[in-house]
Image (spheres, coloured by chain):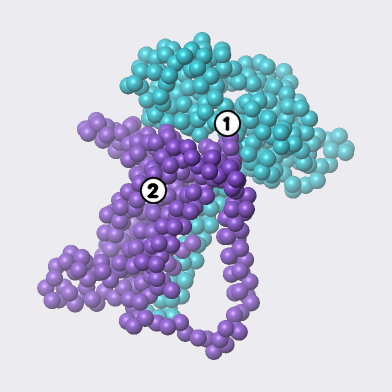
Chain colours: A cyan, B purple
Amino acid sequence: MTPTARRSQRALRTAGLGAAALLALSACSSSGSDSSSAKPDSSASGRLSGTVTVFAAASLQESFTTLGKQFEQAHPGTKVTFSFGGSDSLAASITGGAPADVFASASPKTMKIVTDAGGASGTPVTFARNQLEIATLPGNPDKVGSLKDLTDKSLKVVLCDKEVPCGAAAQKALDASKLKLTPVSYEQDVKSALTKVELKEADAAVVYKTDVHAAGDKVEGVEFPESADAVNDYPITLLKGTQHAETAKAFIALVRSAEGQKVLTGAGFLKP
Amino acid sequence: MSPTGKAAAASEPLRGGPRRRRVRTPGGRRGVPLPLLVPALIGVAFLTVPLVALLVRAPWRAMPEQLTGTAVWQALQLSLVCATAATAVSLVLGVPLAWLLARVEFPGRGLVRALVTLPLVLPPVVGGVALLMALGRNGVVGKWLDAWFGITLPFTTAGVVVAEAFVAMPFLVISVEGTLRAADPRYEEAATTLGASRFTAFRRVTLPLIAPGVAAGAVLAWARALGEFGATITFAGNFPGRTQTMPLAVYLALQSDPEAAIALSLVLLAVSVAVLAGLRDRWMATG
C-alpha cells in the first residue's frame, strides 16, 4: 500500500470512529422528547391540533400512554408525545428550558421546583395519589410480610434514592415505624428499582403500588400498613411558553375527567 | 474524538525512524485555508465553551462548604480506584486481543473486531442491562459464578470495575490495534528468524515498540472509565462508599442541589485534567 493510500485509509477509519462517537452521543441525549414547535396552533377554529409534549413521572408511564392514545383518537390531528423519567430530572430539564407543554410529577416537592422557577402557567392540581408497596420475587419465596421483614440482613433490598419521590416516601415510612434499613442500592428512579427485582438481582424493592401492578406477574406485591404514612400526591400543570395551550389544557382535562380517573385507578392509583 | 488518530499520532516516531519535523507547506503560515480554519475554531469553541460555562457558573463561594463532606472524597476515591482497576483489566485482556486482531489471520476476524468494539456504540445503560443478563445473580454466566464460587457481582465494587472495563476496553483495543498495524512487522519477523519464540518476540520486540500506543489507549480507557455512568448505575447500583462513583454522585446531587453537582463535577474535572496532563508529558509527548 502506498503511504497516501494508507493515510487516506486511516483518515477514513478515523471518520468512521467520529461518526460512531456522534451516534453514541445522540443516543445519550435523553429519551424522545420530540419538539412541539413544528406547526403553529390553529385552535382558532375550535378544533384541537398540534403536538403536546408531556413530561411525566416514570410511574405514570402505563396510564398516560393509554390516555395519550385515547386523546389522539378523540382529537384527530393531535399528537401526544411523552418523556417519562424521575420527577426531579424532569423538573431540572424543564427549568433548564426543555420544550414541554405539560408536567405531571410524582410529588409536590418536585412540582415546586418548576413553580418556583416560574415555569408553570396556573396552579398545579393534584390528579392522583400513589401508595408504596413492597415488590418481591414471584411467589414471594422469602416470605416477606411486612416492612420489618426487609431489615433482614440476608435479603437484598433496593430502595429509590432519597432525592427522588419514591425514595423520600420510603424513608418517611421507615422513619415513622422507626426501622433502619440498609439497601444494597439506592436506585435513581422507581422503574430501575423495580427492574432489579424483575431481573431477580434483588429480593425486594419498595416501589409504588402502580409499578407492581404494571409489572404483572414478574413481581409480587406485598402491602404494608406504614405506607399510609407516605402517600404521594401527583400534581399536574400546564407549562409556560407552550405553543398549543388549548390542546395541552384538553389533555389535562382528560386526565382529571372520570374517564381519565378510571384509567388511573385501573393502574393502581388512588383518587385525589 | 478518535482513538485511532491519537494512537497513530503516538506511534508516529516508530515508523519514520528519526523523528519527523513538521513539514512547512509552501504557503507557510499565511495559507491556512478558511474552509479548514473556521470549522476548526468552531470545533474548539463547541468543546470548550460548556466547560468554561461550568467554571463561570460554579458556586465558588460555597465551594469549600460543598466539598468538605466525606461523601465527596469517598466517591472520588472510589472513582479513581475503580477506573484504574478497570484500566488494568483492559490492559491485561485488551493488548493480547489487539495483537490477535492485528497479527493473526483467522476466519471471522472482521466480525470479531466489530463485536468487541460494539460497546462503543451501545448506550451504556443497555450495556449495564446486558451485563446483568450475563453476570447478574440470575444471569447466563452469573448463575454459575454464584452457585460454584458464591460470587455475585451486582451491587459490589467489583461490579463497578466490570461495568467500567466493559465500556472502556474497546477504546484500548482500537488504539493498540491501530498502533500494531502501523508498526513494522519485520522487526518481529527478524526476531523469530533469529530464534525467538513468537511470544518472546511479542514481549521483547513488539511491546516496547508499541508502548506509546498502549499508553495512549490506556489513558483513553482510564478517562472513559472515570466518567462512566450508565453501565455502572445499571449493573452495580448506587450505594455510597461501595458503588457510588463520582458521576453517580453528580447525577443524584443534580436532582436536589445543582450547585453541589457543579462542585462535584469540577473536582472530577480537575483530577482528570491533572492526571491526563501529567501523563501527557511522560507518555504522549509526540507533538
Residues at discs 2 and 1 both on one chain: no
Residue A45 relative to residue A104: left or right: right
Q: Which residue is mark 1?
A: A58
In the figure, is residue B76 to the left or right of A64?
left
- Rendered residue at 64%/77% (across/down): B34
Crowd band around label 1 with a 10 angstrom C-alpha radius: few (<14), some (14–19), many (20+): many
In this orientation, which residue lies closer to the viewer: A21 or A52?
A: A21
- Image quarter in which the C terminus of chain A is found: top right
Residue that mark 2 sits on: B80
Q: Amino acid at mark 1?
A: Ala
Q: Residue B60: x and y, percent?
A: 59, 48
Left or right: B69 with respect to B163?
A: right
Give the image location of residue A84, x and y in percent. Answer: 60, 35
Tag 2: residue type? Leu
User: Where's residue B6, x and y in %?
Assistant: 42, 67
> Is residue A236 shown to the viewer in this render?
yes
Residue A107 versus residue A118 in the image, above or below: above
Q: Nearer the viewer, residue A215 or A169?
A: A169
What is the chain identity of the residue bearing mark 2? B
Q: Residue furthest top?
A: A225
Res A64 seen here: no
Q: Is residue B251 above or below residue B95?
A: above
Cβ atoms under marks 2 and 1 closer than 8 Å? no
Q: Which mark is residue A262?
A: none
Identify the residue at horizontal 44%, vertical 57% (top origin).
B274
Residue B180 sits in which quadrant?
Answer: bottom left
Q: Quadrant of residue A98?
A: top right
Q: Secondary structure at mark 1?
A: helix
Place residue B157 in its image quadrant: top left
Q: Quadrant of the N terminus of chain A?
A: bottom left
Q: Secondary structure at mark 2?
A: helix
Give coordinates of residue B137: x percent, y percent: 33, 32
